[in-house]
Amino acid sequence: MSTPSSLESLIKALRCLPGIGPKSAQRMAYHLLQHDRSGASSLADALQHALGALRHCQRCNTFTEADICERCLSGKRDASLLCVVETPVDMNMMEQTHAYAGLYYVLIGRVSPLDGIGPRELQLDQLLARACDGVVQEVILATNFTNEGEVTAHYLAEMLRSRAIRVSRIARGVPVGGELEYVDAGTLAQAVRERRSLT
Amino acid sequence: MSTPSSLESLIKALRCLPGIGPKSAQRMAYHLLQHDRSGASSLADALQHALGALRHCQRCNTFTEADICERCLSGKRDASLLCVVETPVDMNMMEQTHAYAGLYYVLIGRVSPLDGIGPRELQLDQLLARACDGVVQEVILATNFTNEGEVTAHYLAEMLRSRAIRVSRIARGVPVGGELEYVDAGTLAQAVRERRSLT
Ligand SMILES: [Zn+2]
Ligand SMILES: [Zn+2]
């Protein structure tokens, strides 16, 4: 009287998606089978194709179909600026600001002692070699402002400064359009401490 | 400088999943590529296998790998009771109550004039033939207590009563406007026990 095994396998497989529990997985499986078989088939193809085609860029670590990504190969980017982010999604967010025209280095992770990820696990040799190549003039740290992101930024800053490389950190503060009433106290405290002189 | 096409295709394909917008799809794609390639590969396989293996049971319409599902073939179910539900998920919910030991008929849809689905589109001949086969003694209507589900139940009750078949409706223990999929098993069990005769 059980669910057919292929249906059970599909429900189980859908749980590899982040944020999808057993109930959502069941709903998704029935939805696909009942209402969107061509969508399900396209998804299977897209997964297989992406797994086969995508790898990490040898220079910046983002996903690319070539050995080195378009951005790293572009002559239009300012190669003297190197922005360090935690993930390819963060890199996309930076790009959407149109406020940065330099290059990137994606850490693919951050220092997280609780998860057993120390500086060594991040394999920073490649970043170090990059920062010291004589072309890069400034490394901009754009890791998250979480505990792990801050620890990572702190560690990277120490590491790079000891090699006399200029390092900066993106600013922290009240979001643009943000109202003080809705900003958490920690953020506001930080915004006060890091206030800029207007004179 | 754009996203690689295979990554873009994957993000787009993930949007066939119900409730997944562009932002979630992006997050899912990066998660799979970064942290769960084997899960992604299993998902692709499970999708393809399920699409190939699953079809509708010829008697009750639920998904099965055979022509007729295990439940319909089982000698342990009370064939004199036929429960009509809207979807296979609703059937699973009924089973989880352990309050019902009869057989099922899955409508795969409900009367929905706004979507252009009238009684004719539901192809009720099969249900009618089943209800009139001389074995079935009572048809229990377990469509949702939404407007469409109520209209469907009303229509089915009229249709079956005109053929002198005993019809009942699960009790309104299910919250008005609620959907079976999201009701706890205890409430649903009560609704089965307190079903009202519509004759
Ligand atoms: Zn690159
Ligand atoms: Zn069946």
Image (cartoon, coloured by chain):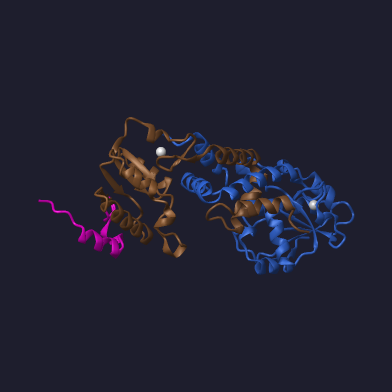
Chain colours: A brown, B blue
Q: How many numbered badges does the structure rendering display?
A: 0
Observer-nearest residue: A62 or B49?
A: A62
Query: Is A173 within the magenta?
Result: yes
Task: Measuring from the top left, give residue A138's x and y in whole percent.
Answer: 26, 44
Identify the magenta region: A171-199
Query: Is B142 within the magenta?
Result: no
Mark yes or no: residue B86 visible: no
Observer-nearest residue: B57 or B128?
A: B57
Task: Measuring from the top left, give residue A5's x and y in whole percent.
Answer: 73, 53
Q: Is residue A103 left or right of residue A16?
A: left
Query: Residue at image x 83%, y 54%?
Result: B72
Quarter of the image where one finds residue B194: bottom right
Mark yes or no: residue A118 visible: yes
Name of the residue lying farthest toward the left: A199
Query: Residue at image x 57%, y 46%?
Result: B17
Query: Residue at image x 17%, y 54%?
Result: A196
